[in-house]
Image (tube, coloured by chain):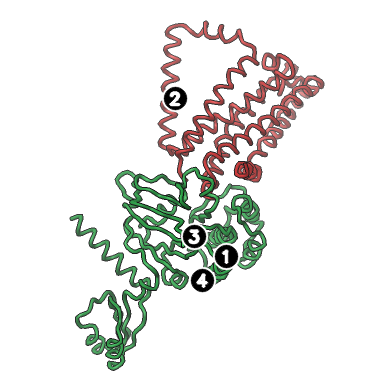
Amino acid sequence: MNAVRTVIKMHTSTLTWFFLPSALLIQFLSTLIVILMIRFFGGKTPIYPGGLVSICVLMFLLGIVSLNDTFSFALGWSCRRTDYVLGTTVMAVAVSAVAAVLWLLFSRLEIVTGGWGVELHYFHLPYLNDGSLIEQLCIYFVVIANMYFLGFVIGSIYRRFGRAGTLIFLLIVFLLMSIFSFVWTYLRWWGAFFHWFSQFTAFELALLLLPLTAFYLLVSYLLLRRAVA
Amino acid sequence: MSTIVEAECLTKRFGDLTAIDSISFSLEAGKIYGLLGRNGSGKTTLLRLLTAQLFATGGTLLVFGEQPYENRRVLSQICFMKENQTYPKRWRVGDVLAMAASFFPRWDADYASVLSKDFQLPLTRKVRTLSRGTLSAVGIVVGLASRAPLTIFDEPLGLDVVARSLFYERLLDDYVEHPRTILVSTHLIDEVSRLLEQVLVLDQGRLIIDEEAEALRSRAFTVTGSASQVATFTAGRTQIGGEQFGSLVSATLLGNVDAGERRQAAALGLELTPVSLQQLMIHLTSTASHRKARESV
């Protein structure tokens, strides 16, 4: 248990994790200023700037960066690969939970203040924010954690197979997606697909993300077990 | 004395390159070892295998009686200060020392703070802005204060001469008080030779020497004197090196010196001195390389 705690301590001391909230806060405040200016010049439409995409992108990057920043170091200082993955997972889950609570708080605040007084819908979005508070919290948590572990698995591919391996992997993914999308279009399956998709609530979709997140974590672990430092 | 490392036919290949070529050796507890060899001889690869940072292609390796891979019992007893050890980007020197307390179970914080004063570590500076020398000093402070039963220093090279001598001094002092196994990998052979009890020499991935430092030194000696007298003395012996300073000539010869030879040297007005480990190494590694080159032709 001590070794896992050491990995968590290492992560907290790298400060990388605390850049996430500060970067988001800066982005939110600058958006707010821009909206205030728009309102000042008479713009009236409600605005959905998609600030949540930033959270997802930042978590994804954090997955890559935190691994790149600490894995080699930790192994160099006699850390087991398993302890590294366990400690990092605990850290990521804790950060995702805190981020989810903050997201919920800010989205409630957004509703109460009428979109920060200027009809800015930054945190609170229709559909995504349907359901009970607990359901919303779960949605935020799963989405954030899923993005982190997506970054983490890509970082793990890089650690295991190097630059060339990662490039080949990404090319294969790109190729498969192109073929998939072509076949899907050719067979005219998109309509049916979206219809199937739309029958789920955001909460149900978030639950569907859970096994995918677990899959990323498992693959990362298997890759890092064979990675060298 | 207990054995803490046992390698049997250990091999590591990177594609076509054989970095470690079927080597077998053992390390005993409570000794200072020197791992010597030229650049690219496989020293760092061997150390990365010992610490499970790399995977062997063949052979067996036991550290503290167990295989080291993913083994917390083994790894927690090792401190390996890699030459190119990386640290998280935003860390300051103080963070490195603070975290070392969590990573190394036998960490001595008081000793670390004494050492950081001795080596004048800038505790508030970011690690990534440090010069190579200061970075080496950070590694040395961590390595010494970790008091790990197996402490490995890989090429503590970037240090200036004052810091290096401070390192040797502190290492010996602390080793006497807290005996443990220390493995120093370097090519500054003559400087560390007085520390070493046992020497392992790698050449092109092969272990060509695994011998006590004293025994190794008695493998050869240097004779110095006037050219003609030296020539008389060296006749019929294997000479592995030599230098000339004006009328004075020194020759390095293989073999032991017995009492009769000492008398002969004294009669000829020659001075006999122990060979430097470095000279012996140059001779042994160059002949081993030549032999290997000949074999491959």
Residue farthest to the left? B297
Which secondary structure lies at badge 1?
loop
User: Is tag 4's residue or tag 3's residue first in the polypeptide sequence?
Assistant: 3
Q: Nearer the viewer, residue B252 or A114?
A: B252
Badge nearest the viewer, 3 or 2: 3
Q: Residue at x 39, y 73 (%)?
A: B214
**Mark pair 2, 4: CA separation:** 53 Å
The C terminus of chain B: image quadrant = bottom left
Q: Label 3 amino acid?
A: Phe
**Mark pair 4, 3: CA separation:** 17 Å
Q: Which residue is mark 2?
A: A173
Which secondary structure lies at badge 3?
strand
Q: Which residue is mark 4?
A: B161
Question: Answer yes or no: do the residues labelled 2 and 1 have beta carbons within 8 Å?
Answer: no
Q: Residue at x 33, y 51 (%)?
A: B9
Q: Nearer the viewer, residue B72 or A158?
A: B72
Q: Which residue is mark 1?
A: B178
Badge nearest the viewer, 2 or 1: 1
Q: Which residue is mark 3?
A: B153
